[in-house]
Amino acid sequence: MEKNEAENMPCYFGYLKRKEAKRFLRLAGATDGLYLLRSSATQLGTYVISITHHRKIHNYEINYQKDQGYSINDYGSHMALNKLIEYHMLLADGLCCPLRQACPKPSGFYLPPAPLYEMYRRATLEHVHKKHKLRGKDLHQYVDEHYDELLPEVIPRLHEGMAWFHRRISREDAEHRLLNVKHTSGLFLVRERDFGLYAISLLHKHKVLHYALVNEGGKIFLSCNDRRSSRKFDSICQMVEFYSDNKEQLVTRLKVPCVAPELRRYSEEPNGVSSSSHTWPRLPFSLSTLRYRGKMVAESNPPQDIFPVLWDNLYMVNKDARPSETPVYNSIYADPEELRDRRLELDRNRLRLDQNGELGSGNFGSVLRGIYKFTKKDMAVAVKVLKAVEDPEARRAELLQEAEFMAQLDHPFIVRIVGICDAEALMLVMEVASLGPLHTYLREHKGTMSQNHLIELVHQVSDGMSYLEERRFVHRDLAARNVLLVSERYAKISDFGLSKVLMEDQTYLRDKTQQKLPLKWYALESVLQQKFSSKGDVWSFGITVWETLSYGDKPYKGMRAPEVVKFLQSGQRLEKPTGCPETIYQLMLRCWEIDMNKRPTFKEIERHLSHYLTMAMQT
Ligand code: ADP
Ligand code: MG
């Protein structure tokens, strides 16, 4: 089998477990014929196609035989994988339906690393191929017969193929690469110091620490350790694997690999952080210029129309569109040509507003429809316009803070920021979700959306929240009014006006500013002690699920905030919405545990809902 044949194919997701494949397909909307190609994590060297049909996910192993090439269930035979894919786009032939659309990769996706045993095997095959010029079946046979003898030759160089291995870079370069990212402790890389000498560079609390590695007779260990008592490893890979689970002498575990620039295949990540969930925080914009800029630059004449627009055409949505069928699933930041020379500040001349098209409003001002002219395409946008108020500076600072927060996020179930435009007013430009807030939409479409359909939407919200949780971002205003619909099948989290980032050593933050807070959505520790954390967001998520499943009802109707506190303290909770499945209500109740440690994490909630939907679809 050709080694990297699949890796350049857009539909290839690497070593993905069946469950993960399901998750990606489901989140992308599970339309008929939506598919992905992956390597089986259990069957060495076997590719699998996962495809959706009638909302169910089917998996097909691809057989390979040296002389006959690739085939599925013995239908056809193709000498290359991409030929097999092309063939099955025309004909189902053994599949449940023809392949239609490759599953889009979430922004920042990188190929999950192969399991370690597979790395060994691959590296050994490559080694033997180079050394003995063997190929195909002979190569595999040789490796099988000499595996144990070969390992010592292969293992010491195994790290060379790892994403976290940055080859020969200076200490300063390593620091630069690690510090390019905000708020991540445990971000690490391995670099070569001098020929055959290595070091681990590790970020902790905004500082980079360097650990030199010693190699004594093939045994590798940390130089900070006492030689006799130190834990020794046969390879750098094994060492990294060990210290990703155990802190021992390190200041923190090796939690998140910083991907070497030459390996960032699927996105033009400026900083290349990756994590187990295939996404990573990004800072796509330069923010410093913005923050220190002085007063508002008043531009007396907003630019004239630059292109004719049929607003309603532009904003027309197919209400049944699944996430992957909309223009806002894939990241606007993903196109390297649009990204080049990109800053948070947008050019006013490229922005056009529809003064008559108000999408909504809040106490900051209004949200208007707009179009932003990128280099290659025009994009429908929503523009939050700051109204003139008594204390413009404070309001400006708040909106800039919101923009700065959003600029660090890039996820399909979160409204992405396009940029900030500082002209006749300060404007925050973002992706548009035309169907508007979830609660009002549900009130108006009560009869037409099933409970499972609603659970699909809250599942998307839990996936977006799990992304925030992983990054220690606290939303603080999660509610159905702040979940916007792109289509009936696609929800995005919005409104980051109250959001904050928890520092590494904080378990919660305190807010004493006493601004107007959405108390009915808050956990008791937030109402009574002004403590905020992701577990507080989990409580609000429970309320959001309740609102959704009761088709936009108001929680605790007729009660005032102090009464709600008493109500909760006496052990009472919101009632089960009509028609709501019992397990989903139980999940809400777990979100409303007084003891925040008893509440589930978003990661658990996401898994739970994913499982629920899988079961629901099978019946
Ligand atoms: P506030 O902080 O005042 O609650 P929001 O960010 O929630 O402000 O926006 C207010 C309203 O504007 C929303 O309820 C919604 O109707 C509309 N809106 C905001 N962002 C978008 C968007 N990206 N797409 C479509 N409508 C939006
Ligand atoms: Mg809002």
Image (cartoon, grey):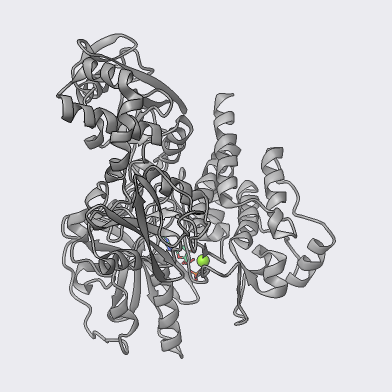
Residue 99 in the image: x percent, y percent? 31, 25
Q: Residue furthest right?
A: 570
Instruction: Give coordinates of residue 208: x percent, y percent.
Output: 38, 68
In this orientation, which residue lies closer to the viewer: 354 or 332?
332
Q: Taking the image as drawn, is residue 317 in sight? A: no
Residue at x-position 36% and y-position 56%: 213
Q: Quadrant of residue 198?
A: bottom left
Left/right placement of residue 268 relative to residue 446 reads left
Q: Is residue 222 above or below residue 322?
A: below
Compared across the picture, whether 29 is left or right of 443 comes to: left
Does 377 sit above or below residue 278? below
* Residue under the point 29% across and 22% down: 143
Quarter of the image with the N terminus is top left
Residue 576 point in image, percent of width and height: 73, 46
581 versus 220 height, above or below = above
User: Could you tell me how many numbered marks the image carries?
Assistant: 0
324 to the left or right of 360 = left
**Residue 102's x, y, as percent?**
30, 34
Q: Nearer the viewer, residue 541 or 21?
A: 21
Q: Residue at x 48, y 50 (%)?
A: 231
Assign the C terminus to one quadrant of the image. Answer: top right
Q: Is residue 380 visible?
A: yes
Quarter of image, res 319: top left
Q: Depth check: 262 or 435 in front?
A: 262
Instruction: Identify the residue shown where x is 69% and y is 59%.
Output: 596
